[in-house]
Image (spheres, rainbow, N blue to C red):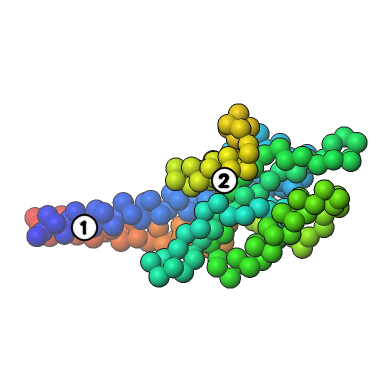
Amino acid sequence: MKIVSLIRWIAVAVLGIVLTVIGVIEFVNLKKAPKDLTDPETDWTELAVGDHVKMNLNALFDPFVITTKDDGTETMRDYAMPQLVYSESGDSINIANYIGIHVNDKDLFAQYDKLADETIDWWMDDDAFEFNPETIEIDGIVKEMDDESIGFFKEYLEDMGYEDDFIEGTCYKYAVYPAQTGLPIIMIIGVLVTLFGIGATVFSVIKRK
């Protein structure tokens, strides 16, 4: 039992270290100069995991992933954000890229759905050019999605008629995840858990002697 107890406290210390590292990485990422993906000057081809994104989201398509609980309650959604590029003449608009927008607050689903519906209606209307919807403020971090979500996003884009060459040139493997405002707390918890785990481990070793 003493060996089991020792292993348990070592596991606690390792968990604390993991929490601390995650907190430090996220905190450092948030200190980076933010990128605005709605700014025509932003080069999406240079986006990388860990980039800080801050923008007023002004165009959105349907969710390609909806996560639910066993009872059917929706908990998370991943929406498709298109990069709208205006021609030099300013008389036409094309979609040059895509990235995911991760939403983990169900109270915000209606707001994102509204923007997605408005964007799709506008995009499908050949006579409409100006588009000034109510924007959504985003403050987040670029992360690579899990393989399943990436697969769903690719299928979503394929269903829209895009060829593999175009899809592979987009940011479809990435999504913007909400910034964790409580990161300093995560780091503090991580440090405390680490110290507690180490202390308990040392105590267990001394007690065994």
Against 96, residue 196 (above or below) is: below
Quarter of the rendering containing residue 138 = bottom right
Q: Disc 1 or 2, which lies upstream in sequence? A: 1
Kindly identify the amino acid type of the residue bearing the numbered disc 2.
Answer: Tyr
Question: Which of 192/178 is in front?
Answer: 178
Q: Which residue is mark 2?
A: 156
Against 8, residue 48 (above or below) is: above
Question: Which of 77/56 is in front?
Answer: 77
Compared across the picture, whether 130 is left or right of 10 comes to right
Residue 101 location (% of width, % of height): 60, 52
Compared across the picture, whether 34 is left or right of 196 comes to right
Quarter of the rendering containing residue 63 = bottom right
Question: Which of 59/30 is in front?
Answer: 59
Q: CA distance from mark 1 to mark 2?
A: 44 Å
**Callout 2: 10 Å neighbours few (<14), some, many (20+)?**
some
Kindly identify the amino acid type of the residue bearing the numbered disc 1.
Answer: Arg
Q: Which residue is mark 1?
A: 8
Q: Residue at x 55, y 66 (%)?
A: 105
